[in-house]
Amino acid sequence: MILEVLSGTMVGEVLSFARRQGYSGLEFLAGVPATVGGAVRMNAGAYGKTFSMFVKKVKLLKEGKIEDYQPRENDWTYRSFRREGIVVSATIGLIRVSPEEIEKNLKEIYFKRKANQPLTERTFGSAFKNPPCCYAGKLIEDCGLKGYRIGGAKVSERHANFIVNFGNAKAQDVLALLRGVQKKVWERFGIMLEPEVKFLGCSL
Ligand SMILES: Cc1cc2nc3c(=O)[nH]c(=O)nc-3n(C[C@H](O)[C@H](O)[C@H](O)COP(=O)(O)OP(=O)(O)OC[C@H]3O[C@@H](n4cnc5c(N)ncnc54)[C@H](O)[C@@H]3O)c2cc1C
């Protein structure tokens, strides 16, 4: 099935629609809070799959004009779509499978996330990108930083690449914590973690 979806649509809505129609593909993004536009720009991904694998075409608004664009492989990188412009819609290709298979995929993803991520706490998703060698969360954990806190922000005890707002964390608390984590990982492993999260009005 080929679906053109407007950029403000939540990926979860696309998933529910596809599930009802018996089409599969985006289950890996179950539980990821994203609009279609945000998922394109961030090349949202999980468990070895990325949004780019399903996007056939995007409509981009650039300098007052709408362009139909067929992304090439090198437009996509880890958590980024490089082509400029505002995403107006994305055309997504999904495949028909049995309802049982979709349910199985969704359950698998749900249990994986539940086992490893602080789903019931206030976070902004992964703080740092995984460097080419390994998982950012493992590096942070190996520095003994689970539970490390500044103000109202702490490194999750469940998954070290998540920052939890456990009280009234200020942006400054989160930034200080991220800087502290980055510094410790650099000192211990010589790896400079790059933020995955985007900053507005501040930077690391
Ligand atoms: C609990 C939790 C779990 C998460 N898990 C994952 C995960 O497993 N994998 C993953 O990849 N991410 C994950 N995230 C991060 C987040 O969900 C993704 O980055 C998502 O793609 C962001 O979508 P958004 O619509 O919220 O975009 P925003 O956060 O609003 O924006 C992200 C960027 O995209 C740009 N943008 C947004 N809409 C458009 C548009 N229409 N056109 C052009 N640019 C646009 C913004 O300017 C910004 O630069 C998680 C977040 C949370 C809170």
Image (tube, rainbow, N blue to C red):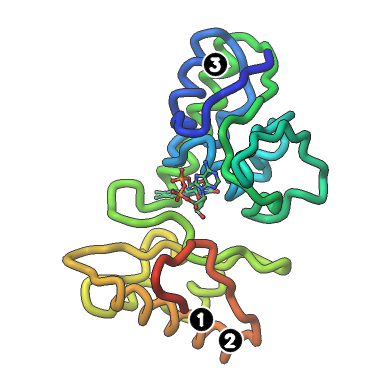
What's the residue type where badge 1 is placed? Gln
Q: CA distance from mark 3 to mark 2?
A: 43 Å
**Which residue position holds label 3?**
18
Q: Closer to the camera, 71 or 50?
A: 71
Q: Which residue is mark 2?
A: 186
Q: Which mark is residue 182?
A: 1
Name the kind of residue labelled 2 in the image: Trp
| Marks 3,2: beta carbons within 8 A | no
Task: State the residue at coordinates (78%, 34%).
Answer: 70
Mark sitting on residue 136 = none
Mark 2 burial class by Cα count in 10 Å: few <14, some 14-19, many 20+: some
**Left or right: 161 as drawn, with respect to 86:** left
Mark 3, Cα crowd under 10 Å, few <14 / some 14-19 / many 20+, is many
Pick whichever of labels 1 and 3 is earlier in the sequence: 3
Which image quadrant for residue 124? bottom left
122 lies left or right of 42: left
The reply to whether residue 45 is in sight is no
Secondary element under disc 3, as helix, strand or loop, is: helix
